[in-house]
Amino acid sequence: MQLTKFNALLDIELRVSDPISATGAGYLAYFIWFDTFRMSTFYAVALVILLLVTFTASIALRVYEQPLGERPLSQYCCIAASWAAGFAGLIALAYLLKVGEFYSRGWVSLTFILGLVFMALTRLIVLTALRYLRRQGIGMGRCLLVGATDAGIHMVDQLESNLGLGMKITAYVKTSYDHGVPAGIPMAGSLQNIDEILDRGEWDQVLVALPVSANRAISYTLDRVEERVMTVKFVPDLLGRQLINHRTEDCAGVPIVTLRESPLLGHAWILKGFEDRLIAGAILLLIAPVMLMLALGVKLSSPGPVLYRQRRVGLDGKEFEMLKFRSMPVDMEKNKAVQWGSAQTKTTTRFGRFIRQSSLDELPQFINVLRGDMSIVGPRPERPMFVEKFKGEISGYMHKHLVKAGITGWAQINGWRGDTDLVKRIEHDLYYINHWSLGFDLRIILLTIFKGFVHSEAPTPAAQPANATAAVAAAANSANEKSI
């Protein structure tokens, strides 16, 4: 109960401090710009509208649903996005009502910047104080672990390294399903005498970390806890499985555990689509002259069409035609066995080699983004025959199709591109899917600008899956590039 009160106070503090920070930013900007704190009615109304729109956007983005100690940077990006949405709403309203001339652009810009700074400082102060208090044992939930299974031991390690979660396992109960001994955690006893253990009253939470098949042990534990006022949480031993966007939910009164699902559902799907179209449209406008010169270079370097389309697998495992600038002579792969990777052995034109090394051949894929086939950020798409092959060789390979394929991604900016370790690439793709946010997308886009384009010829693979680079002769004809 003390932990519940602590978390409730923290949640209230954030919900109050953000509007105070926003209001303070508006008044300080007014003082800096007009040399007075006596804000006029026009500006006061604008500030109230700004706060209302920001508050509504914060609800849509679920800013306050996750505890502050978990992914603080991602949460700040969400409140920053809410703040930006507030200004977008204010500017749109001023335009519709034709009252924009009554407001100073300097005040609007300064309020926006100061608001971002104030909310960042508030979160930094709260987070620093929270970590200090929890290091002192204040606001920490005392947990009793039932079952030293792989999931239980993993839970101990995670809670020890993430004090911001506000949970600490102080003892564990030995069961017949144990796989080891949690380091540094004393044994309170065995499952047979759990009544005596619970009667000590030293814990306010019980974490049941038993395999789903241990239904009798789980039922016995829940029956014993039923007679006490304690929080009970189930930690199923599923560490051997790939979990994507997993969570629990209530379906008509029946508890359901989702083990694998795309993170881009509901409002997230809309936000991601808006982000893709907005950025792709802006980039295409900016690079139109560059694309024109590249098209001319391709045309002059070898006879044939400028673009080609290639069948790739994207969202939900469905195929689409990915566009690229042609870098090889026409029909180069015709009647040849198609191999995965092998970039160094592929014949390219002189100009094609340049645009491949600099990734400029990928620029037409922004058209794919506008079409809705791809995203700016996401796992790189693969050819159908390789998808069919790798899905049986690499654990979790098909999970990357829970989101749209991307032009760039977390794997690419970390160096896993070209003929590199495909297993590592999939690990990075799944990490991206599990941790997706608009802030994470923007971070990847910025990193791509600095280190994601120019690269050398593909290095030697570190550890490819069995037969990953072998020829897939049976699928060669279907993989031929179709010129346009």
Image: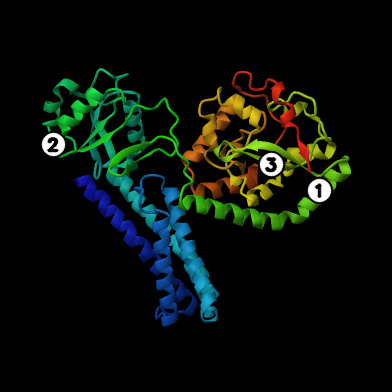
Mark 3 nearby-residue class (10 Å; few <14, some 14–19, many ≥20): many
Mark 1 is on which residue type?
Ala
**Which of the 4 quarters of the picture holds residue 477?**
top right
Q: How far apart are marks 2 and 1 (CA)?
A: 73 Å
Describe residue 278's horizontal placement relative to residue 188 as left or right: right
Mark 2 is on which residue type?
Arg
Mark 3 is on which residue type?
Met
Describe residue 93's horizontal placement relative to residue 23 as left or right: right
Residue located 54% across and 78% down the image:
100
Q: Is mark 1 on a helix, strand or loop?
A: helix
Nearer to us of marks 2 and 3 is 3
Residue 49 point in image, percent of width and height: 42, 71
Residue located 58% across and 45% down the image:
377
Q: Do the residues labelled 2 and 3 touch (CB within 8 Å)?
A: no
Describe residue 333's horizontal placement relative to residue 472 as left or right: right
Residue located 64% across and 27% down the image:
386
Q: Circle 2 is placed at which residue position?
A: 228
Label annotation for residue 322? 3
Closer to the N terminus: mark 2 or mark 3? 2
Quadrant of the image for the N terminus?
Answer: top left
Image: 438 above or below 187: below
- Most foreground residue, 41 or 97: 97
Q: Circle 1 is placed at which residue position?
A: 295
Q: How far apart are marks 3 and 1 (CA)?
A: 17 Å
Residue 36 point in image, percent of width and height: 43, 80
Q: What element carries label 3?
A: strand
Closer to the N terminus: mark 2 or mark 1? 2
